[in-house]
């Protein structure tokens, strides 16, 4: 039985990855921060199958202790301050948790279990103001937010440890991936949550920023399969994970509202406070390498993803109404 440690296990990606690894027969540990009110909603259904350990990504000593305790075969570093908007409000925190903390994780692995395989969650936000379209593994980075800058640091320090210490360390440059488990502060879930409320008479408008921003959106459940595949290869490498399609925020809005029989124009209000200080206008990934070398493929289309998220939010509010 293989053992895996997942940081960020309570998040969207961590919960889907935990499910995948459990299905493959892994012993799964999840790193969680000690808080007075832990949020376990995404992993409630598997709490009896996993083991949670308390630690802090900014505290190397706690990570070393956890590595010594678990001795994992695979480490998936998914934890971060991952909301781009918040990274302007809390740039130092974002730099510490999303950037420098990656070094802490790598150091803990290097010191305690150097033969463990390490996955770093990199992001398409690193491309930012893109210098070529579509973006692939060799595309230069031009981040447009403190979050993107921190992710670039995490990405390059992972490569540095791989090359300096001959560690099996790799990064998945994941483009936007969503699901019903996405936090409501993210625009996709904000949209589907509002659509469900409006349909059920619980709200009457949806306030958004830039409807023209283009993203490459996929289903998180598909993307965690790529994470696992990266750590099963003979040699470590970095991969872009994407759909290869781009859609605007407005397209997402249109599908979501039409799915419940409403016209989006009747409910959407443009609010300048939701426009980013520096916008990333177009993200479109080229995942050819992942498809060819990992044998990875998508199962859920963009339209299926939007409808799935709307349906789950409708179910949630109908349950609450009862």
Image: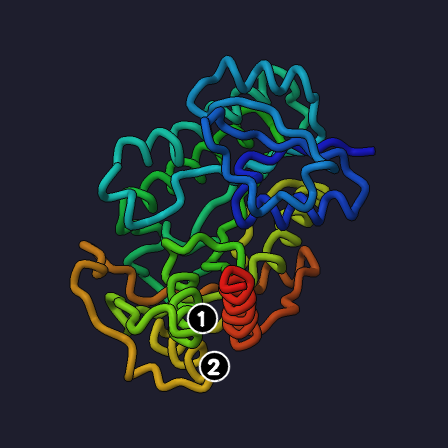
- Give me the residue at 50% from left, 39% from top: 39
Q: Say whether residue 63 is left or right of residue 149.
A: right
Q: Which residue is mark 2?
A: 260
- Give me the residue at 69% from left, 27% from top: 72
Q: Which of the numbered marks, if any, corresponds to residue 93?
A: none
Q: Secondary structure at mark 1?
A: helix
On screen, residue 40 above or below 248: above
Q: Is residue 222 visible?
A: yes
Q: Is residue 218 visible?
A: no
The image position of residue 312, as x and y in percent, is 55, 65
Please identify the quadrant where the N terminus is shown. Answer: top right
The image position of residue 108, as x and y in percent, is 55, 20
For residue 152, which quarter of the picture? top left
Q: Residues within 10 Å of mark 1 (few under 14, many from 20)?
A: many
On screen, residue 79 above or below 128: above
Q: Secondary structure at mark 2?
A: loop
On screen, residue 142 above or below 91: below
Disc 2 vs disc 1: Cβ atoms closer than 8 Å? yes
Q: Which residue is mark 1?
A: 196
- Separation of residues labelled 2 and 1 (CA atoms): 8 Å
- Give me the residue at 45% from left, 80% from top: 255
The image position of residue 82, as x and y in percent, is 40, 44
The image position of residue 173, as x and y in percent, is 49, 51
- Give me the residue at 24% from left, 66% from top: 209
Frontmost residue, 320 versus 226: 320
Frontmost residue, 311 versus 28: 311
Please identify the quadrant where the C terminus is shown. Answer: bottom right
For residue 43, which quarter of the picture? top right
């Amino acid at each position: 039985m293989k053992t895996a440690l997942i940081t960020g296990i309570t998040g969207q990606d961590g919960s889907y990855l935990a499910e995948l690894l459990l299905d493959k027969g892994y012993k799964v540990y999840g790193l969680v921060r000690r808080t007075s009110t832990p949020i376990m909603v995404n992993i409630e259904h598997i709490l009896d199958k996993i083991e949670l350990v308390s630690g802090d990504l900014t505290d190397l000593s706690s990570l070393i202790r956890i590595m010594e305790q678990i001795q994992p075969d695979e480490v998936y570093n998914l934890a971060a301050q991952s909301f781009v908007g918040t990274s302007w409000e809390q740039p130092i925190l974002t730099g510490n948790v999303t950037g420098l903390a990656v070094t802490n994780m790598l150091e803990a692995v290097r010191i305690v279990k150097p033969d463990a395989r390490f996955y770093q969650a990199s992001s398409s936000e690193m491309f930012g103001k893109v210098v070529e379209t579509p973006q692939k593994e060799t595309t230069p980075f031009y981040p447009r937010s403190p979050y993107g800058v921190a992710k670039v640091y995490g990405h390059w320090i992972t490569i540095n440890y791989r090359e300096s210490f001959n560690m099996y360390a790799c990064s998945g440059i994941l483009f936007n991936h969503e699901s019903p488990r996405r936090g409501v502060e993210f625009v996709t879930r904000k949209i589907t949550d509002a659509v469900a409320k409006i349909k059920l008479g619980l709200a009457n408008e949806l306030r958004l920023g830039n409807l023209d921003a283009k993203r490459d959106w996929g289903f998180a459940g598909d993307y965690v399969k790529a994470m696992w595949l990266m750590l099963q290869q003979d040699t470590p490498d970095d991969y872009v994970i994407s759909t290869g399609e781009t859609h605007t925020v407005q397209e997402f809005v249109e599908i979501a509202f039409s799915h419940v029989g409403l016209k989006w124009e009747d409910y959407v209000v443009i609010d300048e406070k939701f426009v980013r200080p520096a916008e990333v206008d177009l993200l479109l990934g080229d995942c050819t390498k992942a498809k060819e070398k990992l044998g990875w493929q998508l199962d859920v289309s963009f339209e299926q993803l939007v409808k799935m998220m709307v349906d789950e939010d409708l179910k949630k509010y109908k349950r609450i109404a009862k």
